[in-house]
Amino acid sequence: MTERRIRLILLDFDGTLADTRRANTLAYVATLREAGYPLTEAEYEACYFGMRCDEFLRERGITDPKEREHLRLRKIALYPTFFDTVRLNEPLWNFCRQFQRQGGRVWIVSTGSRANIDNAMRHLGIGGPDEDAPNGQVDGILSGADVVRSKPAPDCFLEAMRREGCTPSETLIFEDSDVGIEAARRSGAGYFRIGKEAFHP
């Protein structure tokens, strides 16, 4: 049987294509402090990092949906003020651009907020499917709002494959988190784990 070639690369964003950990942490700390909810960087990193915004705020005891939405939007607004801490995984991105030149397709598939992803991509000089950008562009973006079940369910990866008309055997996934790796495994595609050393050689 002939082995199928890889036609599609799916990239998680936070922690995989970009090191946004400190920027996200600082934005949440600033947002909650501004609203009168004390939170330290160490506490957020240890207990909440990687949670969806709404889940994180509920865990902090913020029960009013309107207040949670206000805080979510405020965090998005504050996030770019900490972009001096954001780093691009340049070896991975260069690999993806070479893959595109050979006819492959590259998508970002993240459970993060689309607004946060778009803002960080602009900072890094990476465009979406219909945007010219100095450092190239991706062919598609799926964010947390695009699927009902988030990682570790494989839905986001399977949906990107469906939109591209690719099978799991034609797809390669790059992830950094345990839940992301589990979602990749359940999707049936091949996958690689990105370690922190990718940003701090």
Image (spheres, rainbow, N blue to C red):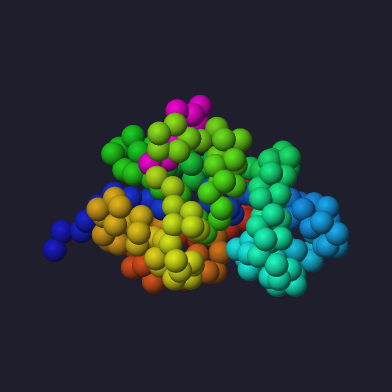
In this rendering, the answer to whether 147 lies above or below 114 is below
* Side of 43 relative to 194 (left or right): right
Q: Quadrant of residue 90?
A: top right
In this rendering, the answer to whether 159 lies above or below 135 is below
**Residue 54 lies within the magenta run:** no
Tell me what residue is drawn at x 59 percent, y 47 percent.
116
Q: Position of residue 100 (x, y in %)?
A: 35, 38
**Residue 137 lies within the magenta run:** yes
Point out the stretch of residues depicted in magenta.
Answer: 132-139
* Image label count: 0
Residue 88 shows up from this direction:
no
Q: Position of residue 175 (x, y in %)?
A: 50, 59
Q: Which of the two residues, 133 or 194, is positioned nearer the viewer here?
A: 133
In this rendering, the answer to whether 103 lies above or below 76 is above
Q: Position of residue 65 (x, y in %)?
A: 66, 65
Q: Quadrant of residue 84?
A: top right
Q: Looking at the rendering, in which quadrant would you find the N terminus?
A: bottom left
Tell me what residue is drawn at x 56 percent, y 53 percent.
113
* Side of 17 relative to 168 (left or right): right
* Side of 48 relative to 36 (left or right): left
* Side of 22 relative to 176 (left or right): right
Tell me what residue is drawn at x 41 percent, y 67 percent.
154
Q: Which of the two residues, 92 or 188, is positioned nearer the viewer here?
A: 188
Q: Main secondary structure of the magenta part?
A: loop
Tell me what residue is drawn at x 69 percent, y 54 percent.
70
